[in-house]
Image (cartoon, rainbow, N blue to C red):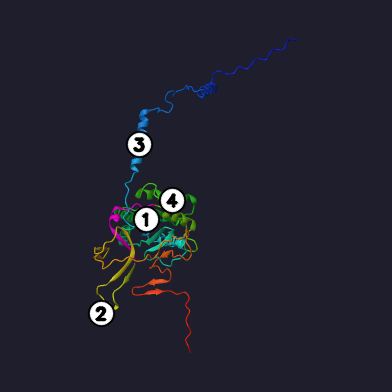
Amino acid sequence: SRAPQPTPRHKPRKDGLAQSTKKAADRFRAGGQQSGKHKTRAFGVANLGRSKRSLQRNADRSHRKEVAATIRRDSGVAPTVIVVCGPRGSGKTTLIKSLVKLHTRHSLKTCAGPITIISGKDKRLTLIECPDDACALIDLCKVADLVLLTVDASFGFEMVTFEALACLQAHGFPKVVGVLTHLDKMKTNKALQQVKKALKHRFWQDVYDGAKVFYIGGILQSGKYPRNEMRQLALYVNRVKYRPLAWRNAHGYVVVDRVDDATPGSRIRADADCSRRADCYGYVRGARLKPGGSVHVPGLGDFSPESIEVLDDPLPLISKTSTLEKSDSVIYAPLSDVGGVAYDDDAVYIDLKTVAYSKEEE
């Protein structure tokens, strides 16, 4: 019989990737230098010319984003003016009613004149619907801080939309947000996605690449848009920042909320064509109004105001608590029949829900 052979001892590997990595780690722990491609300049650049071009490109991009600081000359008290613009039947009135319902829990019957609402503890919005009129469009483009441009997605862009964009460009181009409505008329999901993509890219061509676009479906039984979609739009409107335009920052102007005819009735009865005296109420925006200066009224001409008075705020901000309460006044719309007060040409009507009449004494 043969004698058992001794088992050969295992010889560890001295070459290969694992051994070279282990040796380099051992040298690093011992305080020596690692061997490799970048031994002396471990964190240097591989290509000097390419690195210089990359640094120059990044510096140019950051420089293009720099904007000169603009000092706002207004007091910051006036609410933000939001103009809802679009062709007829695109959902402008429904959009305003839905935003008012979301913020104030009021259901508007009519949308007439400026509608000022409180959207937060230190934020107020003035919603104005732009009628289907070129003169009204020009006047509102001069005062708008944000424009909600409604587009009927089932029909597409109309000439009124392009006219509005051209008018906005001529007046400084304030911030514009697209709102696509009537999306519930799309029969298939594929058609819906195609329409969204096509209208969004066409909107970007006239505004700028990446402009914000909101998508709103159908109308609920209550006559309002879905609450979730309105929440997203309201959140953006409350948080967006507006850059003051140069001309508005240097001139004072007033968006009139209400006009009262203060001409005595005897003068009107004596002469129907006599000169009228009108009291105009509204927030001052831009620079301050100077007494004794001329005021231009669009469509009428230049006038010299008899007096300028500072009145109490009809819709003061709520600062006592962090949340709004039901007893707080959250809407001011003198021309939209809100709060039981209606203004006529020569009278003010107050709607009393319940009236307790006293009985006649016998």
Residue denoted by label 2:
270
Q: Amino acid at mark 4?
A: Lys
Q: Position of residue 133 (x, y in %)?
A: 32, 62
Residue denoted by label 1:
146
Res 213 visible: yes
SS at mark 4?
helix
Q: Is residue 255 highlighted in magenta?
A: yes
Sequence-earlier tag: 1 or 2: 1
Residue denoted by label 3:
57
Q: Residues within 10 Å of mark 1 (few under 14, many from 20)?
A: many
Q: Amino acid at mark 2?
A: Ala
Q: Nearer the viewer, mark 4 or mark 3?
A: 3
Q: Nearer the viewer, residue 162 or 179?
A: 179
Q: Magenta segment, which residues?
A: 241-257
Asked if residue 96 is positioned above or below residue 33 in the image, the reply reads below
Q: Residue at x 37, y 56 (%)?
A: 147
Residue denoted by label 4:
196
